[in-house]
Image (cartoon, rainbow, N blue to C red):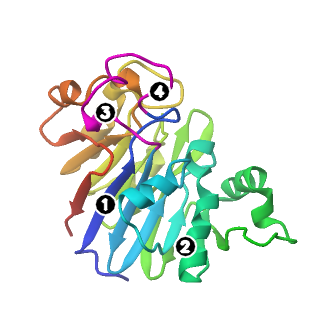
Amino acid sequence: MKNLQSMTLTFLGTGTSTGVPVVACDCEVCTSNDKRDHRLRTSAMVEIGGLRLIIDCGPDFRYQMIREKVDDISAIVFTHGHRDHIAGLDDVRAFNYVLNKTVDVYAGKEVVEAINKEFPYILHEKRFFGAPQLNFITIENKAFQIQGLEVEPVLVMHNKLEVFGFRIGDFAYITDASHIPQEEKPKLSGVKILVINALRKSKHISHFSLEEALEQISEINPDEAYITHLSHFMGRHEAIQKTLPANVFLAHDGLKVHVPN
């Protein structure tokens, strides 16, 4: 198993499905000049021991790769099949062309089905020239390895939809959750860095509110927690951050976090 001492997390995007600013919205968040209030669709990158793992590949994937000057990726792992988490998959073909490589994709069965509907030309047996070159590995709710790195899924609920969070060493990543089943909680025991979603301050049917996310953070008790998948209804980054516990942070696009061993 890979040495976990050199793990770095980069928030590629921290916004909900609309992104922030929202098209045609003139609220104080969407018109903010604070770059931390500008949020692409949620995605993350984990770098460890030469491996570069992308968590979700939404519609802003191309720009996220260019902004972070990413010249290679090792694999992509998907949390679920909603479009704001899979819609950038076609842009993976740039890595195919430039590096002459096939990219491994780790996803649950339902995600593969969603990708097949969104991109029928990728998995079709008579692929057209230029389609992304991807190697699909189906995952279940049990630990698996990506090039020697152990990844443990954490099954959470997005209203009635099952979504995978992931734990890698002392780091756990949970997005698009409104409930963490009690039987999954032991998988989060002892995490030092927790990423968890909170859509807004008020309650929502399929996402944690800020209060609910803070309750989960208090129960899991990581050293540090970062909140992602935010909407413009959350409020200005600067104002909300002042209300949070000392070890809890609103994530923002481009933020890099070192994960201690």
Q: Give the residue pinned by disc 4.
A: 22
Q: What is the secondary structure assignment of the residue under circle 2? A: helix
Look at the image and give the residue range highlighted in magenta. 20-41
Residue 59, horizontal then vertical, whole percent: 56, 47
Write the residue at 44% across / 43% down. Answer: 182
C-alpha separation, residue under disc 1 versus residue under disc 4: 26 Å
Up-down relation of residue 128 to residue 35 (above or below):
below
C-alpha separation, residue under disc 3 versus residue under disc 1: 19 Å
Q: What residue type is labelled 3?
A: Asp
C-alpha separation, residue under disc 3 versus residue under disc 4: 11 Å
Occupied quadrant, residue 102:
bottom right
Q: In the depicted view, which residue is nearer to us: 152 or 30?
A: 30
Residue 189, horizontal then vertical, whole percent: 31, 55
Q: Is the magenta stretch mostly helix, strand or loop?
A: loop
In the image, which disc is placed on residue 95?
2
Q: Give the residue pinned by disc 3.
A: 37
* Sequence-first tag of 3 and 4: 4
